[in-house]
Image (tube, rainbow, N blue to C red):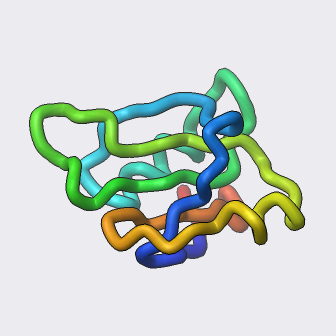
């Protein structure tokens, strides 16, 4: 797992699902165990952790060119990437 602090991958069309997570680590674990579609990264909103609010965006794989264009500075977000499922489990 890799973590890009204070950045959000801004690719609305690549959002598979939005869920509630208590932490960034919980958010990327939701991605790792998702069975419906392949999930390779997640955006975690650090400021929206109360009342079950959907603060974790599970994302499809994004090609490297789109990734470079879409990674945006957002102070209230952290972006997480699965490097290998073995590192998450």
Most foreground residue, 50 or 38 = 50
Front-most of residues 89 and 81: 81
Q: Is residue 86 visible?
A: no
Residue at (74, 36) in percent of width and height: 38
> Residue 46 sits in which quadrant?
bottom left
- The N terminus sits in image quarter: bottom right
Residue 87 in percent (x, y) is at 61, 67
Q: Residue furthest top?
A: 36
Left or right: 67 as drawn, with respect to 48: right
In the image, 50: left or right of 63?
left
Q: Quadrant of residue 68?
A: bottom right
| Residue 59 percent across, percent down from the top left | 63, 43
Residue at the (24%, 50%) spot, across then down: 22
Q: Position of residue 75 (x, y in %)?
A: 35, 72
For the image, the number of numbered tags is: 0
Up the image or down, 73 lies above or below 8; here it is below
Can residue 44 be seen here? The reply is yes
**Residue furthest to the left:** 51
Depth check, front residue: 54 or 68:
68
Q: Position of residue 34 (x, y in %)?
A: 58, 33
Q: Is residue 88 left or right of residue 82?
A: left
31 relative to 66, above or below: above
The C terminus sits in image quarter: bottom right
* Residue in view at x 69 percent, y 34 percent: 13
């Amino acid at each position: 797992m890799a973590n890009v602090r204070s950045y959000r991958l801004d690719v609305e069309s690549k959002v598979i699902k939005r869920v509630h997570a208590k932490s960034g680590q919980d958010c990327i674990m939701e991605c790792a165990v998702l069975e419906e579609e392949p999930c390779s990264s997640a955006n975690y909103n650090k400021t929206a952790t109360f009342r079950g609010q959907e603060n974790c965006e599970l994302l499809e794989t994004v090609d490297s060119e789109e990734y470079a264009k879409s990674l945006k500075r957002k102070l209230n977000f952290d972006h997480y990437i699965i490097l290998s499922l073995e590192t998450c489990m």
